[in-house]
Amino acid sequence: MTTFVDRVVLHVAAGDGGHGCASVRREKFKPLGGPDGADGGHGGDVVLVVEHNVTTLLDYHFHPHQKATSGKPGAGDMRTGASGDTVELPVPNGTVVLDTDGNVLADLVGEGTRYIVARGGRGGLGNASLATTKRKAPGFALLGEPGQSADVVLELKSVADAALVGFPSAGKSSLIAALSAARPKIADYPFTTLIPNLGVVQAAGTTFTIADVPGLIPGASEGKGLGLSFLRHVERCSVLVHVLDCATFEPGRDPLTDLDVIEAELEQYQTSLSDRPRLVVLNKVDIPEGRDLADIVTPDLEARGYQVFAVSAVSHAGLKELLYALATLIKQDRAAKPVEESTRIVLRPTAVDDLGFTVDLEDEVYVVRGAKPERWVTQTDFGNEEATGYLADRLARLGVEKELAAQGANPGDAVAIGDVVFDWQPTLGEEFSSGMRGQDARLENDDRVRAGERRVLKDIRRAERLGIPIHIEEDE
């Protein structure tokens, strides 16, 4: 049964925003109550949160689909819709979030670090929020905005100060068990360790963590033997510890050859690890042949510039010296790193000439792209003429019509915004029809005619009550 997973594909969907409400207050003895439609609730977000007690992505291996709840619609009497519940997904420290193309979206390091992987949709405004001095009783409301959905890749990169690297069965698991309270699986066959193991060590007044990385083999940097999965856990480590087996009986293997092979794989890995300080551990010196071989290769390793420690995970020989050397290197690395603020705010000012949208002619269709126009279109109820006019108002104020005219668009040309395609009927400029945006002159004339008819009918009824003769002239 799978117990450790360090890479998953997560399918997330945030909640949709609730629709706004179009309502007019109706109460006895209170005429002209005005609009009282409330806003819809916001959709819930999907958030990744780093938690120290989470060490694997196993939960998302079995449950890759995560969805937040949607917001509730608004109601009359100014009753705002409830917002959807945010879904918080706990992830291990060191989780990297990537899109499906491999681009890094976030690097989550540190307890409590949060990243919104899918943002919930905004709730639609009710007609009470849309009321203005010119539009005192809107007969429409805005629809809720759809929540974001995405497919993301989560990769776990262990966060440790030092990493033990070497061939399978070199004794790395035995070494970390001797140095810390970690209890990894130990057996006498290759690839016993299939997952990274972390141990906490205290030496020379410094507390640090050591990672036992599963064994590497030639071709690991190209993925052979799950090499890429294993090397990923070395990236964050400050110090690399080469664990060399001095008691191997495999042909063609010796400490110097093993060191050259592992160094070549580290150099060829996509993230170069050549700048990390190194220590060399000659393991299994409790065996006489291992002690003799360690004495032979130590001068050659020191000539290459390595600090060499002959140790035994069984008898604990040389472990104290190794721990103090590790603590010194890690302390120096921490002192050299700049102190980073817990929160960084990156300001990206908008360019002065940025309109917030673009207009491109594609296959005889003028395509308008931009966050605001596309969001406004999704929030518009096109079954309501007043809502459509309100959308046209907003687009005109943003400058979309002006830009379309500058691009050479003519009345009747096809314009696409998001998933909506319509024929452009502009109102800007002297060559186009006049009148306020969102109002139809024909409807205005009809309203005036009806108002005149009502006045005439009222005068007729009043004259009848008073007994005044009525004479109506008909037009020829």
Image: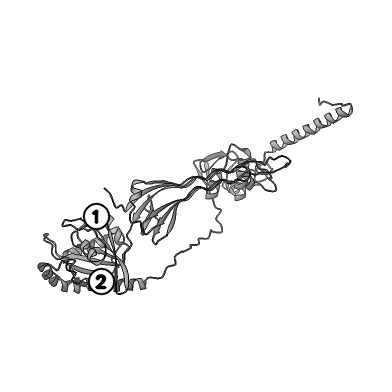
Near mark 1 (Cα within 10 A), the count class, few <14, some 14-19 or many ≥20, is: few
Tell whether 413 sits left or right of 321: right
Q: How many labels does the image show?
A: 2
Question: Element under label 1?
Answer: loop
Q: What residue type is labelled 1?
A: Leu
At 23% from the left and 71% from the top, the residue drawn is: 322
- Tell me which numbered mark, 2 or 1, is placed earlier along the sequence: 1
Q: Nearer the viewer, residue 460 or 91?
A: 91
Q: Position of residue 46 (x, y in %)?
A: 44, 50
Q: Which amino acid does label 2 sit on?
A: Leu
Q: Nearer the viewer, residue 132 or 83?
A: 83
Residue that carries the numbered disc 1 in the rendered image: 194
Res 287 seen here:
yes
Q: Which of 407 and 308 is in front in this view?
A: 308
Residue that carries the numbered disc 2 in the rendered image: 323
The C terminus sits in image quarter = top right
Tell whether 351 sits left or right of 28: left
Asked which quadrant contains residue 288, the reply is: bottom left
Q: Where is residue 100 in the image (x, y as percent from the top left)?
A: 37, 49
At 42% from the left and 59% from the top, the residue drawn is: 113
Residue 159, compared with residue 407, is above or below; it is below
Q: Where is residue 377 in the image (x, y as percent from the top left)?
A: 55, 43
Q: Where is residue 330 in the image (x, y as percent from the top left)?
A: 31, 71
